[in-house]
Amino acid sequence: MTLHITELNWECLLHLFSFLDKDSRKNLSQTCRKLRQVFLDPSLWPLLNFHSPAELKKNNYLLGPSLKFLSICWHSSRVKVCNIEDWMKSTFQRDLCSKHENTVSEFLMRVCNMCPNLLSLMLSGCGHVKDHHILQILQCCPGLQTLHLENCSRITDLTLVAITENCKNLNTLQIDFCRNVSHEGLKLVKEKMPSLILHAERSAEMIPDSKPDEKVQLARLWQKALHY
């Protein structure tokens, strides 16, 4: 006897969907109303992994209180453009960034509003995410246990201060290649949260951003030095 997929019970359908990627789940859900209901079952979405900002715009996933583990890891040549200081970008580079500049931050605001039970967040290559975006996540997801920020150039010591003030349940912090994080900020975290597992690769050893007027002054001093 052969059963049609829609004749399977709910638990079997959920189990079947769990083996599919986001696109496959969406495609299958469009075949009938019952499978669409399975797609919308919150228990199917405790984990979300994204590999580019474009994926965040797809309607192939569900955000809700069941989400526990979220990862947005963008590895692309465009990441280098995003990490250039804004005042140094060419017109072409600004246009490139403008197409996705707010995508990740707007998505994170949706997470704040809809996913209060988040336990783990990883952001890699998200060059436009700023301190206040992370602060909102920390305030709206009080149970967060793991935070991993990698190559997020707009993140500064303000995020580290917010962590010490808002993250009672955080047990692991990994902050790598974030050039505007300082030794002082990392020291503060160690002092305030001695039991926290802290990993910071190169973050406090990179050249931080400086204001345009500071760089202009340095350039003028350098030119004067060359004339002597």
Image (cartoon, rainbow, N blue to C red):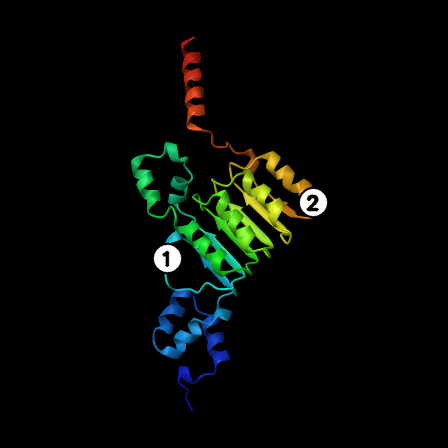
Q: Does label 1 or label 2 sit earlier along the sequence? A: 1
Q: Can you give x and y, in whole percent of width and height, for residue 157 in the image?
A: 56, 38
The residue that mark 1 highlights is 57
Foreground: 106 or 35?
Answer: 106
* Residue drawn at (56%, 51%) of the image: 147
Q: Can you give x and y, in whole percent of width and height, for residue 227 in the image?
A: 40, 10
Q: Is residue 212 left or right of residue 162?
A: left
Q: Specify the quadrant that holds the N terminus.
A: bottom left
Determine which of the numbered discs, if any, sits on residue 194 in the image.
2
Q: Can you give x and y, in whole percent of width and height, for residue 68 in the image?
A: 54, 61
Q: Work out how far the residue at label 1 is from the one at label 2, CA to CA, in angstroms.
A: 39 Å
**Can you name the residue that lies furthest to the top here?**
228
Q: Is residue 165 above or below residue 25?
A: above
Q: Is residue 73 above or below residue 220?
A: below
How crowded pointer 2 is (Cα within 10 Å; few <14, some 14-19, many 20+) is rated as: few
As helix, strand or loop, the secondary structure at mark 2 comes to loop
> Label 1 amino acid?
Lys
* Residue drawn at (40%, 79%) of the image: 34
